Image (cartoon, rainbow, N blue to C red):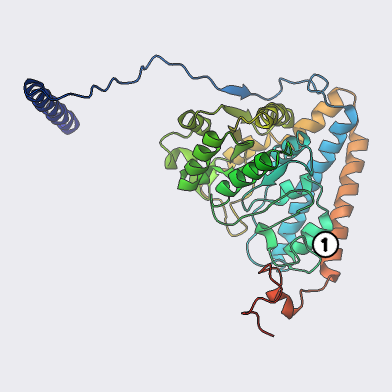
Amino acid sequence: MASQTKNKKKAEEAKGKQAAKAKSEQEASANGQEQEVRVPASSSVEVTFATYQAEDYDHRELGLEDAQLLDMYRNMLLQRRFEERAAQMYGKQKIAGFLHLYIGQEAVSTGAVTALEIGKDSIITAYRDHGLGLALGMTPNACMAELFGKVTGSSQGKGGSMHYFDAEKKFFGGHGIVGGHIPVGAGIAFAHKYKEDGGVCLTFFGDGAVGQGSFHEALNLASLYDLPVIFIVENNEYAMGTATHRAFAEPDFHKQAVGYDMPGAVVNGMDVFAVYDAMKTHVEMAREGQPSLLEIRTYRYRGHSMSDPAKYRTKEELEEKKNEDPIIRLKQYLIEHDLSDNDALDAIDEEVKQEVLDAVEFAEESDLPPLEAIYEDVYVQDDYPFLTD
C-alpha cells in the first residue's frame, strides 16, 4: 500500500513538472522565442544478436581437420592438468602470491586461439591467463617456472601467475587490474590498423570488468575508430564471489554492444566448436575494421583464487555444471565420430600428465632471478640516471 502511495505521488509530481514546462514553452512562444523540439527515439527498432549454441556442429562443416580436433583435445587437457598440478604446488608453498585457475574454461582459450593466426594476431587478457598462454603454445616449462618465480619463466620470474607474456606470440599479458587492460587492447588494435599488418586483437576480460568505466571507454573508441578488435567477456557467472545477476541491472552483457553501435553475440563457452565458430566469424569482421562484443558464457570449477572456498554456490550447482565439462564433451565427440577411442585418449592424458610433471621439475631446478635483475626491464634507457648499483 505504501508503495502504491509513493508511486502515485511520483506520478503527480511528474505531471506537475510537465504542465509547468508546457506553460513555460507557451510563454516563450508568445514572446517570439524559438523552441527546440526533442522527438523521442522510436521504440519499434529491433536489435538481434547472434547465438552460438552447443552441440549444433560438425567439425568438417566448420573447416576443422580430424587431426586438429586431437590437437585441441590435447591442449585443453594440458591446460587442465597444468593447473591441477599448479594448485598442488601452491598448497606446498612452492608458488607464492595469487593463483587464479582457469579450470572449466578451457574451451574458450582453445576455441579462440584455433581461429587466429598466431604471431600475426594479438591477445591480451586479465589475471586468469594460464589457459590462453598454453593455448598459444607457450611451453609448460616457461609457464610453470614463472609461477615458481624463476628466471626461466615467461616473464623471467618477475610476473608470476597474473603476468604471463610472450612477445613472439603477441600475447600481451596477463594484467592484474580489473578492466585496466581493456583500453590497452583497443590500443593494440589501433597499432594493427596503423601498421596495416592485417592483425586483430582479442581482448579478454571477466564479467566483473563490465562494471568498470574503462570497458565503456574502450568500446566507444573502438567503434569510433573502426578498430580490428573483439572484446570478449568470459562470463563465468561470478565476479569474485558475487553472482552477476546481483551486481548488474542487465546481466546479458552482449547487449552492451548496442550502445556502441557494434555487433554483439552470445556463445556457449562449454563447447569448443561454438567458441571456434563465433571467433572465426568475428575475427573476419575485425579484419574488415568492424569491432564487436562477444559474451562467452562459461564456468570456473574452482574459486576466484586459491584463497576462495567458493561457499557462495551450492555443491549441486557445481556438480550440474560439471556435466557440461568442455573436455568430456569433446572426448565424447571424438569417440562418437570414430576419430579416436578411450585407450588412445587415455594415452594422451598420461603423456600430458608427464609433460606437466617435467615442467614442475624444470621449475624447481631453475634459478631465482639475481638480485640486480630488479633494475632490468624497467626503463628502455639502459643508463637511466636513477638506477643504482
What number of labels is visible? 1
Quarter residue 246 falls in: top left
How far across and how far down the image is residue 81, in percent? 79, 50
Above or below for 248 versus 146: above
- Residue closest to the far top: 44
Above or below for 8 versus 179: above
Quarter residue 54 falls in: top right
Residue 81 relative to residue 16: left or right: right
User: Disc 1 marks which amino acid?
Assistant: Val
Q: Which residue occupies the foreground of this view, 166 or 367?
A: 166
Q: Which residue occupies the foreground of this view, 337 or 61?
A: 61
How far across and how far down the image is residue 386, in percent? 61, 79
Residue 41 relative to residue 71: left or right: left
- The residue carrying mark 1 is 360
Which class describes the residues within 10 Å of circle 1: few (<14), some (14-19), or many (20+)? Answer: many
Above or below for 376 versus 355: below
- Residue closest to the far front: 32
Q: Quadrant of the C terminus?
A: bottom right
Residue 186 relative to residue 376: left or right: left
Q: Is residue 300 visible?
A: no
How far across and how far down the image is residue 384, in percent? 65, 76
Q: Residue at x 59, y 57 (%)?
A: 176
Q: Quadrant of the N terminus?
A: top left
Q: Which residue occupies the foreground of this view, 22 or 182?
A: 22
Q: Residue at x 75, y 53 (%)?
A: 167
